[in-house]
Image (cartoon, rainbow, N blue to C red):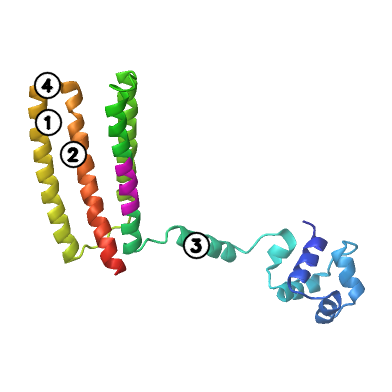
Amino acid sequence: MDLGQKLFELRKGKNLSQEEVADKLNVTRQTVSKWETNQSTPDFDKIVPLCELFEISTEELLIGKKTEEENNTTVENNIEDEEKPMSRQEVKRKSAEVVSTSVFIYIAAVAMLIVAIPVLRIDPIVVTAVFLLAIAWATARIIKHYMSIPKFEKTEKENKEDAILKQINGIVGVICTIIYFIISFATMAWHITWIIFVIDGLICQIIKLIFMLKEEEVNEE
């Protein structure tokens, strides 16, 4: 953008007429018009008054650059916006969202594994590969989320809930392990019974989601 076009846009941005600019700078309207049409350029002693009138720096007027201080302020504001931490409530809602969608992926993967091989007669290798990819994707989402969210000091209530959740998950894990060995020895289908451990993880995530949703309901009340 040339200097004349810039002066024109700056004047329009301030809702000033050429006459008003001329009066403030002690020049004629024709002089301002010549500046804006690039027929002439402002004298050196008019540069600073022009910048003061349009509230810009001389660098921005002459070469289109903001001052270093203005640039730093803009960058700092952008960083602050990008790094603005989530509140405790926002973290809990985001966690519930991530866990719930991951649980859905787990359930869909297990359902696909159960149906695809015996019913749809799809190649077991292909089905297993898709199943493992889906499980890996859901697990990666959960890990990434919990590694990226800010950490808050837990309240006494949250510590109690975590302790209860660990006990429940431990019991579920023991039960699933017992079922795994019973079914595996009874059927000798070791190549497929490992899915019980996936179901174990799925149950644990569902229990965790229930705790999250229950806490969300309490907070809304």
Residue 26 in which image quadrant:
bottom right
Residue 10 is inside the magenta segment = no
Q: Secondary structure at mark 1?
A: helix
Front: mark 2 or 4? 4
> Is there CB contact under 8 Å for labels 2 and 4?
no
Pick the front one: 193 or 85: 193
Q: Quadrant of residue 89?
A: bottom left
**Looking at the picture, does residue 14 appear above or below residue 87?**
below
Q: Is residue 139 above or below residue 9?
A: above
Towards the viewer: 12 or 93: 93
Count neighbours of disc 3 (C-alpha within 10 A) and say few if under 14, some if 14 to 19, many if 20 or more: few
* Rendered location of residue 86, percent (x, y): 37, 61
Front label number (1 vs 4): 4
Q: CA distance from mark 3 to mark 4?
A: 64 Å
Disc 3 + disc 4, Cβ < 8 Å: no
- Given residues 94 and 181, the one toward you in this image is 181
> Looking at the image, is 40 positioned above or below residue 107?
below
Residue 35 placed where, x, y %?
Answer: 86, 66
Alpha-carbon neighbours of circle 1 within 10 Å: few (<14), some, or many (≥20)?
A: some
Q: Which element type, helix, strand or loop, lies under badge 3?
A: helix
Magenta stretch in the rendered image: 96-104
Task: Give the secondary structure at mark 4.
Answer: helix
Q: Give the residue pinned by disc 3.
A: 76
